[in-house]
Image (cartoon, rainbow, N blue to C red):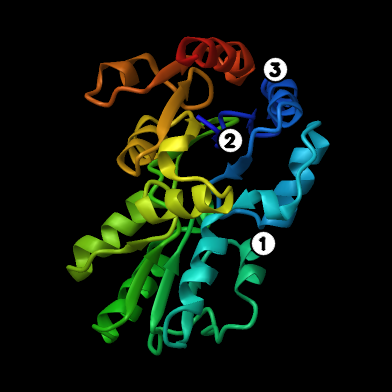
Amino acid sequence: MRGVLFDLDGVLYNGEEPIAGAAEAVEWVRGHHIPHLFVTNTTSRGAGVIARKLSGLGIPAGTEEILTPPKAAVAWLADRPRGTLALFVPPKTRGEFAGFEVLPDAAETGAEYVIVGDLGERWDFPTLNRAFRLLHHNPAATLIALGMTRYWQAPDGVRLDAAPFVAALEHATGRRATVLGKPSREFFEAAVGRLGLVPADALMIGDDIRTDIAGAQAAGLKAALVRTGKFRAPDLDESIRPDAVLDSIADLPAWWALHAAEEA
């Protein structure tokens, strides 16, 4: 292994609280000149906000070190015919799509791309139904999912993420979403490519057995599951087998050193 992809929520922090030893683990990776990238499915904030949050938790990071689904979507859209976007993303994320034509929030027709992220408590029946109507009106419209995370660990308990709402739209329209986030192969390949590596050279560290671990392994990466964040003991009873299970990200330096010694 030559590079590391760090998930954020549940790996480096829970909500607004840093996970003990996270800053030191990232510092160790940097001190050993190991290429790394922060990858997340969050669409509740842009890369700049994430960078400021990490820095406030003792993990200095620039926006170029962070890959988010909106960033991946903008790159994907740049290679496609221009079209009008319908955005179902939080206000803090809308700025990532500056430069594209975006429909007004009340519009129910006219979208070539319907982009769905995590709206959290902003989801309600009229909002979900408007997304359905936009897709139903234009059978050629592309449904874009900014990640397919099922749920996440919030300070008050687990909360639904974007995937259940994307699944509802897929079921209602009979079409499959283009996923521009974890667990899509393209997202992991884009992340590894930013490091100048091939998938087999990289380790993904996450707390979601399916989105992080299974997704990374399907793309050819190694994957380590941490027992923090949304991890639950039954995760280890699934058919998915992580390449490593760490009590927390704080154990990464010792595990990495041991693994390197075994390979030598």
Say what secondary structure mark 3 lies in.
loop
In the rendered image, the vertical position of residue 6 relative to residue 134, given as above or below: above
Could one spot residue 209 in this view of the protein? yes
Q: Secondary structure at mark 1?
A: helix
Q: Earlier in the sequence, mark 1 or mark 3?
A: 3
- The numbered mark, 3 or 2, whose residue comes first in the sequence reads 2
Query: Mark 1 or 2, which is nearer the eye?
Result: 2
Residue positioned 57% across, 53% down in the render? 194
Question: Which residue sits furthest front?
Answer: 264
Residue 34 or residue 244, whichever sits in front: 34
**Horizontal relation, residue 248 to residue 47: left or right:** left
Query: Mark 3 = which residue?
Result: 20
Q: Are marks 3 and 2 in contact (CB under 8 Å)?
A: no
Q: Residue at x 49, y 66 (%)?
A: 73
Where is residue 5? Give x, y as percent: 55, 38
Say what amino acid the circle numbered 3 marks.
Answer: Ala
Q: Residues within 10 Å of mark 3 (few under 14, many from 20)?
A: few
Mark 1 or mark 2: whose residue is earlier in sequence: 2
Quarter of the image holding residue 97? bottom right
**Residue 8 as seen in the image, left or right of residue 136:** right
Q: CA distance from mark 1 to mark 2?
A: 17 Å
* Residue identifier under label 1: 92
